[in-house]
Image (cartoon, coloured by chain):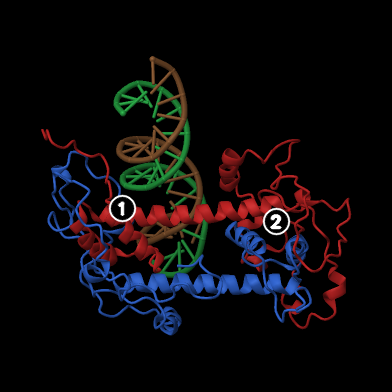
Chain colours: A blue, B red, C green, D brown
Amino acid sequence: MSPSSITPSRWCPTPEQVMILEEIYRNGLKTPNATQIQHITSHLSFYGKIEGKNVFYWFQNHKARDRQKLRRKLYKQLQQHHFFMKRQRFDDHQHDHHHFFQYFLPHHVPQLLPQLPSPSSLQREVGEEEAATEVEGGGGRRWMGGDEGTTVEEEDGETTCGNGTLRTLELFPVRASWVKEEEGTSGNGGWGN
Amino acid sequence: MSPSSITPSRWCPTPEQVMILEEIYRNGLKTPNATQIQHITSHLSFYGKIEGKNVFYWFQNHKARDRQKLRRKLYKQLQQHHFFMKRQRFDDHQHDHHHFFQYFLPHHVPQLLPQLPSPSSLQREVGEEEAATEVEGGGGRRWMGGDEGTTVEEEDGETTCGNGTLRTLELFPVRASWVKEEEGTSGNGGWGN
DNA sequence: GCAAATTAATGATTTATTCAAG
DNA sequence: CTTGAATAAATCATTAATTTGC
């Protein structure tokens, strides 16, 4: 076998190249111009065979997929905008729980919209993708109930717990419906949600 | 007061909880939404005290540190490589690059490039741990150590790279001005920015 | 062996980016 | 140009491992 003469039909970026490209992209360059592409190409060529068009296409695709992903995300959060949080009483514990909630809960929100307000462009784009994306576990559930339910008041808190075995699959399916099926998929292998 | 148990200042996950969380994560769920967090929490509460925010934080941290670890690994790989660049002869390929040039040729832009690898965080990180990166040796920040051990595994062994071609620093300024602004191009009309 | 001291892991907060909508 | 919403990066803080001297 000739290991070095297969002449791949398309560019096969090395990890270093991908990393550098990601870094560049993350630092703000979304659409490089010719000069920039040229420079990037010449620098990346050190890590492997590469041409300008590879860089060009990479940025095109990356930007597009980025936007697509983001749009999907936004759509989903619109769709399940109904979780609602009443402020928990943290007085039970002495530390007032902090700014945790600021992250993801109390956006406004009645139990609205079984359907989305649907800005047309958004809906169209997301509609295509929606089938492949992870499905929701439940409909509009609240985030966390009040002072009951989420916190188990076990003062002893002994950790041995006697359960050495993972009965995960019974109590809590690891491959739940809301887990994406795209696990060890071929392709880039990560980096995406 | 609780004589038998001191109020733990933070969540102390049981091994079962950790295992389940890792299992879920490995199966593809990287950023659970509120509903998912709720479900996970209620299921994990069987193994010990836990609240939603613990699950939330766990996923945040786990994802972040996963990324961090991966990046560090890649960065080390990068470091091992020489930072010399072989120059790609752009003109050689230019003629057989089909119509893709038309996409990005019309632009005329400065010869700036975005910040390349060595994201400051990464650099600091690795710098702490490895201490192999001597930065700021002479004013400029180098982004890869000066290892010259050639480990390139590419079949293309032709090194046009020459000895004087190392213009990495000039080509990759640390902070570019155009990183935030790109699409408003027509209105800008040049490099005013 | 065993604690005090030191270091590594990791839970919890804060700050900076990011995209898009208004 | 500003703001809202979400998150990732960076950082702080505390617990667990471990080292060390006795």
SS state under label 2: loop
Rendered view: C6 above or below B152 = above
Residue that appears at 76% across and 48% down = B169
Camera-nearest residue between A69 and B187: A69
Q: Which mark is residue A35?
A: none
Q: Is residue D11 left or right of residue A102?
A: right
Rendered view: C17 above or below A117 = above
Q: What is the CA distance from the residue labelled 2 to the residue labelled 1?
A: 39 Å
Q: Position of residue B45 (x, y in %)?
A: 20, 57
Q: Are marks 2 and 1 on the same chain?
A: no
Camera-nearest residue between B40 and B93: B40
Which of the image's four quarters has the N terminus of chain A?
A: bottom right
Mark 2 or mark 1, which is nearer to you? 1
Q: Is residue A175 left or right of residue B107?
A: left
Residue type at mark 2 is: Gly
Q: Which mark is residue B192?
A: 2
Can residue B117 be seen here?
no
Mark 2 crowdedness (10 Å alpha carbons): few <14, some 14-19, many ≥20: few
Letter of the chain that mark 1 sits on in the rendering: A
Which residue has dot 1 on it? Answer: A102
Letter of the chain that mark 2 sits on in the rendering: B
Residue type at mark 1 is: Gln
Q: Position of residue A51 (x, y in %)?
A: 76, 71
